[in-house]
Image (cartoon, coloured by chain):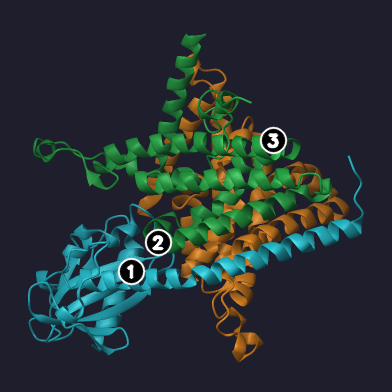
């Protein structure tokens, strides 16, 4: 086995690190536009899903035909799948492990939810991650944000059997076993839809 | 140099089943076939090319810092793969999340670097890495196949269990999606494989 | 405060490194033949996690994240170095393990005698890098959260390996079908243990 001087070892590692860092930076910069386009496309798909359109991975829908308009940052107007004009707003909050967010499609008078599409970064698979499932999201369609007296109550996410005073139109079932994520969705909707 | 020499890792010398290496991170991505396949390919690429590079520079690496050099080379390939996944198969890269990064500490890769690449010529090292990666991927895919089929009734996200079965009372086995079943499946595969090899003897 | 305790409990029982994410399986299977060595490795993992995760947290927060360099001045606010985080994390881990080994050898010979042999194994243990990567993904608000997560994960790992080693010691005396002996039964037991741990989901 050869002997290597400390100087050689030091130079060797520095050279290697430099080479790796430079190559990776180049690759990262080169692929950046593609990555950003992906993120953008993902966002559009979520908005469309909230508005009730079946997601189709390859097809980019014709946005002008849907009268898609950005009213304010993260606040859009779009013709929904049921034919009426609606608004889509972004909501964000905290799940158990990290950020959760989603898009909520509202009727044009902002009282009824038409559909939702949630996303999360790192919820537990099979539990909290279920907020992205259709079975959870479909519950929201047609729910009302105001109670019979016209007060804002949002759509609450509560465990089955713990409905309290809430009427059927103001609540959905939480995901069993994922209390904190469900609570996160609950709070996210309340905070996000309150002033809208 | 025959190809046969390199085929060991695919069956009789499989890294997961026989050497118990590299179970670490990747079983967590076997709930569905698609991410498992991408994971298998990523590991194969990283393993083959890290082996190649280490073998090319094996005579210049000071032995005292060889672990660090190996880690650097492996993490270089892993980041490269991660970036490419994020750019071209964004959906799946989201599913794999941190597990792509964990390829770095996948013991198969470090194990092959230590045991093979440091003492062999580039081409055999490349083949060795490739075959070990594939042998590893094979197990991932088999496990993912059963987990997705029994757990969600789909394969490659396409429903394969006929609708009539569900009406007749068939239910997906939710347990299959949960992590412990992956381990039990691997245990069962080892069992089947061992009883086969024993019979062959 | 409640959040911190919550993270701790969750990472010990529910998002257990071994049972939920299969992290550190290699050493878990290799060093679980008897309870004493298993506990030794478990403590070493705990220790290294508790040191490396907070350090990597700070590095991530002030050097790597998008916008993390803004303390250097306006011009740096858009720099995103997060693609380098893997290399940096693994280098930090390898470096710290080396450092710990040297410090322990000189100042804490008793501890070194107990944990020393495990330290080199740990640099390539997926649980350690996994700890840092999950920490990065989960975006903990403060360094204390990340510390609580690190300790919790470490204890979870320790618990898993000790429980497994204890079962394995008993296993020597039981009759297992020959093809299932060794690794086969080890995987299946881990799976069953994992199912047991899933009972904690309700907490």
Shown colour of chain C: orange
Badge 1: chain ID: A
Circle 2 packing at 10 Å, graded few (<14), some (14-19), many (20+), is some
Q: Position of residue C18 (x, y in %)?
A: 51, 45
Q: Is residue B122 above or below residue C142?
A: above
Q: Which residue corresponds to mark 3? A: B116
Q: Is residue C120 left or right of residue A32?
A: right
Q: Which residue is mark 1?
A: A42
Please state which of residues C29 and C78 is positioned toward the viewer in this rendering. C78
Between the C-alphas of marks 1 and 3, the distance is 42 Å
Mark number, residue B69: none
Kindly identify which numbered label has been placed on residue B90: 2
Mark 1 and mark 3, same subunit? Answer: no
Q: Are marks 1 and 3 in contact (CB under 8 Å)?
A: no
**Chain B appears what colour?**
green
Q: Please, which residue is most extreme toward the front here? A: B1
Taking the image as shown, residue B40 lies to the left or right of residue A38, namely right
């Amino acid at each position: 086995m050869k002997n290597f001087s400390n100087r050689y070892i030091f130079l060797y590692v520095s050279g290697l690190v430099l080479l790796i860092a430079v190559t990776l930076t180049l690759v990262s910069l080169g692929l950046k536009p593609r990555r950003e386009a992906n993120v953008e496309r993902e966002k559009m798909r979520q908005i469309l899903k909230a508005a009730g359109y079946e997601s189709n991975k390859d097809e980019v829908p014709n946005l002008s035909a849907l009268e898609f308009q950005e009213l304010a940052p993260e606040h859009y107007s779009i013709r929904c799948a049921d034919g009426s004009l609606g608004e889509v707003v972004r909501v964000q909050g905290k799940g158990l492990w990290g950020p959760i967010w989603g898009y909520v499609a509202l009727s044009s008078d902002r009282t009824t939810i038409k559909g939702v599409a949630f996303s999360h970064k790192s919820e537990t698979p099979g539990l909290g991650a279920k907020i992205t499932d259709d079975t959870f999201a479909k519950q929201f369609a047609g729910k009302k944000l105001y109670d019979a007296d016209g007060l804002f109550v949002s759509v609450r996410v509560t465990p089955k059997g713990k409905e309290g005073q809430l009427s059927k139109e103001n609540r959905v079932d939480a995901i069993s076993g994922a209390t904190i994520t469900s609570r996160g969705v609950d709070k996210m909707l309340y905070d996000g839809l309150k002033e809208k | 140099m025959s190809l046969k020499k390199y085929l060991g890792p695919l069956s009789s010398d499989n890294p997961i089943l026989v050497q118990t290496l590299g179970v670490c991170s990747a079983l967590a991505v076997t709930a569905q076939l698609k991410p498992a396949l991408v994971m298998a390919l990523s590991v194969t690429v990283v393993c083959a090319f890290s082996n190649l590079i280490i073998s090319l520079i094996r005579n210049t690496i000071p032995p005292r810092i060889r672990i660090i050099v190996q880690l650097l080379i492996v993490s270089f390939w892993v980041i490269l793969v991660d970036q490419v996944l994020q750019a071209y198969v964004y959906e799946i890269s989201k599913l794999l999340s941190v597990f792509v990064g964990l390829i770095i500490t996948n013991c198969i890769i470090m194990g092959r670097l230590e045991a093979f690449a440091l003492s062999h010529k580039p081409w055999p090292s490349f083949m060795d890495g490739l075959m070990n990666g594939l042998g590893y991927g094979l197990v991932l895919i088999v496990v993912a196949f059963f987990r997705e089929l029994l757990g969600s009734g789909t394969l490659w996200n396409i429903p394969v269990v006929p609708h009539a079965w569900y009406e007749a009372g068939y239910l997906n086995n939710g347990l299959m999606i949960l992590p412990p079943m992956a381990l039990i499946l691997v245990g069962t595969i080892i069992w089947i494989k061992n009883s086969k090899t024993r019979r062959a003897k | 405060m409640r959040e911190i305790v919550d993270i701790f409990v969750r990472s010990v029982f529910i998002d257990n490194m071994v049972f939920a994410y299969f992290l550190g399986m290699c050493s878990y299977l290799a060093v679980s033949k008897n309870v004493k060595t298993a506990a030794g490795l478990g403590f070493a993992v705990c220790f290294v996690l508790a040191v490396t995760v907070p350090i990597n947290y700070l590095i991530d927060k002030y050097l790597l994240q998008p916008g993390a360099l803004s303390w250097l001045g306006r011009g740096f606010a858009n720099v995103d170095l997060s693609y380098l985080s893997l290399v940096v994390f693994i280098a930090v881990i390898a470096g710290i393990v080396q450092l710990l080994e040297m410090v322990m050898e000189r100042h804490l010979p008793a501890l070194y005698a107990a944990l020393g042999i495990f330290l080199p194994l740990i640099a390539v243990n997926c649980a350690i890098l996994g700890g840092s990567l999950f920490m990065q993904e989960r975006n903990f608000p403060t360094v204390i959260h990340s510390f609580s997560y690190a300790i919790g994960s470490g204890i979870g790992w320790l618990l898993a390996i000790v429980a497994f080693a204890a079962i394995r010691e008993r296993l020597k005396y039981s009759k297992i079908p020959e093809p299932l002996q060794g690794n086969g039964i080890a995987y299946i037991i881990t799976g069953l243990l994992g199912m047991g741990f899933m009972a904690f989901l309700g907490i």
